[in-house]
Structures are given as structure tokens and as C-alpha cells.
Image (tube, rainbow, N blue to C red):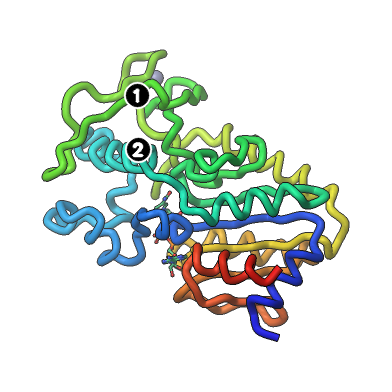
Amino acid sequence: MDEAKQAAQMLDQAQALLITTGAGMGVDSGLPDFRGNEGFWNAYPPMRHLGISFAEMANPHWFDTNPGLAWGFYGHRLNLYRETVPHKGFATLLEFGQQKQFGVFVFTSNVDGQFQIAGFSDEQLEEVHGSIHHLQCTVPCSDSIWSADNTSVQVDAATFLAQGELPLCPHCGRLARPNILMFGDYGWISNRSSDQSERLRTWLHQIPSGKLAVLELGAGLAVPTVRYKSESMIRQYGAKLVRVNPRDTQVPHGHISIASGGLAGIKEIFSRL
Ligand SMILES: NC(=O)c1ccc[n+]([C@@H]2O[C@H](COP(=O)([O-])OP(=O)(O)OC[C@H]3O[C@@H](n4cnc5c(N)ncnc54)[C@H](O)[C@@H]3O)[C@@H](O)[C@H]2O)c1
Ligand SMILES: [Zn+2]
């Protein structure tokens, strides 16, 4: 039996579906992943010019030292993720997952809010690195996290510098920043993500051992949080794992790897159900 058929059978037999995703999940919706410096610099040419890597750019110190650049990077992404229409695979997963006895939950390192745009509820999602659609204070002066829905940021397309007024904290008037966990970030307010994590734990606890399927899509090796999470489900809950990734295809023995892009992989698996 081929891998896609095995994956379909495994998903069919499960009573609960955990979807785990990294940046690769957005690639078929037209979003860049940041795989290596080349990937990041192709998406953000001015950063190549400045010699700034993704790990260097995703650092809170820019909000102090160069707020226009910091908000250029995050403002551009905020606008991009708002405009992007999730590919059809998201809807396929939602429809399938909702038919399961215990339903579906998402664990993602993506900050793009694409699952919510595709119709998933906030209650069935853990955004482990936070969300660009939520803001916090740079100081931070309080634990407050607020929606970015009323915030707009204009970004100069050539320089990637934010123009005009930048988002401010409504409590102290200092600069605001996205509620995203950055590298070397001691100011990230984790309340929202830890509440989500608690909901995931509660959801997992009700599922009988061996009845959980984990479908992982587009999770890379550079920041392996998502891959570790998927693999920990095997040990903790007797889960079966299907890993969909065009390049980083290694999977623990006894589990399934589909060497394919996210959308093509979903189509391949779900056409065999
Ligand atoms: N949209 C977002 O929110 C977003 C975008 C970029 C990066 N990030 C975050 O930054 C960190 C590092 O990012 P990164 O880009 O190095 O991610 P990553 O390390 O998760 O790598 C991307 C992965 O996606 C795979 N991939 C490439 N094309 C694919 C496709 N069409 N379908 C499925 N998988 C595909 C690659 O093989 C790789 O394994 C992660 O925490 C990531 O979540 C988030
Ligand atoms: Zn403040």
C-alpha cells in the first residue's frame, strides 16, 4: 500500500485530529517561508542589502534602535497575511476534522492567522509563537494584549520602512509591537498563547490512547518546535503521525512521510479516503 493510502486509512480510523504546521503550510497560498538566508532575502530584498538575517531581524531590539525598520518588517507581514487567501487545503482539513468524534485542534508556529481566516475558531488553535494580529507594549508596561484589527501600517515597498505614525500602547503611549515571540525576547507576553496551550492540553486529555492522528504540514528543521510537538504526541498519546513536507521528510519509524507540498499532499491523501 502506498503512503497516501496508508495516511488516509490512519486518519479515517482516528477519533481526533491534531494538525501541526510551520511556515511551509502557507507556501501554497503564496506566502514565503524563510528557509535559510536565501529564502528570507528573496522575500525581503532590502534585508539582503543590509546583510540582516531572519534571526537578526526577528529581534525586539529593533523596536528601540530602528522602529521604522522593525515596523517595516512586521507591518509588511501584517498587511500580507491580512490579504492572503488560505489555499483550499485548509477547508478540506476543517471539514474532515469537524466530523471526528473529538474534533480537530491546530498547533502552529505560524503567526499569520491563516487558520482563523479559513474558518477555524480561536478556541481550537495554539499559536505557540504568538500572532501578528495581536499587539502588546514594547516596554512592556502591563500584561495587556490587544487586537491589531484597528491598526494599519503603511510600508514603503522599496525600503521596507514603515511610514507615518507607528502603533502605540494605549496604556503608556510608548511604541507597541506584535505579540510574537522573537529571538532573544524577554518582553514577550505569553498569556494568550499559554491559555491556548491549556485548551490543547484539556482537549488531548479526553482522547483515548491510540485514537489521535497528527497531520504535520510544512514544519522545518531550523526552528524545530512543531516537529518536536508532533513527535511528542507519539510518546504521550500513542498518536500516529503523518508528516507532509517536500524536503525535510525524515519521520520516526512506523509513521508516515509524504514527500510533497502542503496542498498537493492534502489532495493526495484525501482523494484516497
Ligand atoms: N506565515 C508565517 O507565520 C511564517 C512565515 C515564515 C516564518 N515563520 C516562522 O518562522 C520560523 C522559521 O521559519 P522558516 O520559514 O525557516 O520555517 P521552517 O523552518 O518551518 O521551514 C519551512 C518548511 O516548509 C517546507 N516547505 C517548503 N515549501 C512547502 C510547501 N509548498 N508545502 C509544505 N511545506 C513546504 C520546507 O521544506 C521546510 O521544512 C518558524 O517558527 C515559522 O513558523 C512564520
Ligand atoms: Zn505600555
Q: Which residue is mark 2?
A: 78
User: Where residue 266 appears, x then y in whole percent?
Assistant: 57, 64
Category of crowding for the residue at label 1, using alpha-carbon neighbours closer than 10 angstroms: few (below 14), some (14–19), many (at least 20)? some
Image marks 2 and 1: residues in contact by CB distance under 8 Å: yes
User: Where residue 11 appears, x then y in whole percent?
Assistant: 73, 65
User: Where residue 230 appears, x then y in whole percent?
Assistant: 64, 62
Task: Please tell me which residue is depicted at 38% across the width and 21% down the height of the picture.
Answer: 150
Q: Which residue is mark 1?
A: 151
User: Where residue 53 appears, x then y in whole percent?
Assistant: 26, 58
Residue 186 quadrant: top left
Q: Quadrant of the C terminus?
A: bottom right
Q: Of the two numbered discs 2 and 1 on the same chain, state the one appearing first in sequence.
A: 2
Q: Is residue 66 left or right of residue 98?
A: left
Task: Please tell me which residue is depicted at 17% across the width and 38% down the height of the picture.
Answer: 161
Task: Please tell me which residue is depicted at 55% across the width and 46% down the height of the picture.
Answer: 128
What amino acid type is highlighted by mark number 2? Leu
Task: Please tell me which residue is depicted at 54% across the width and 58% down the height of the picture.
Answer: 225
Q: Secondary structure at mark 2?
A: helix
Q: Is residue 125 left or right of residue 157?
A: right
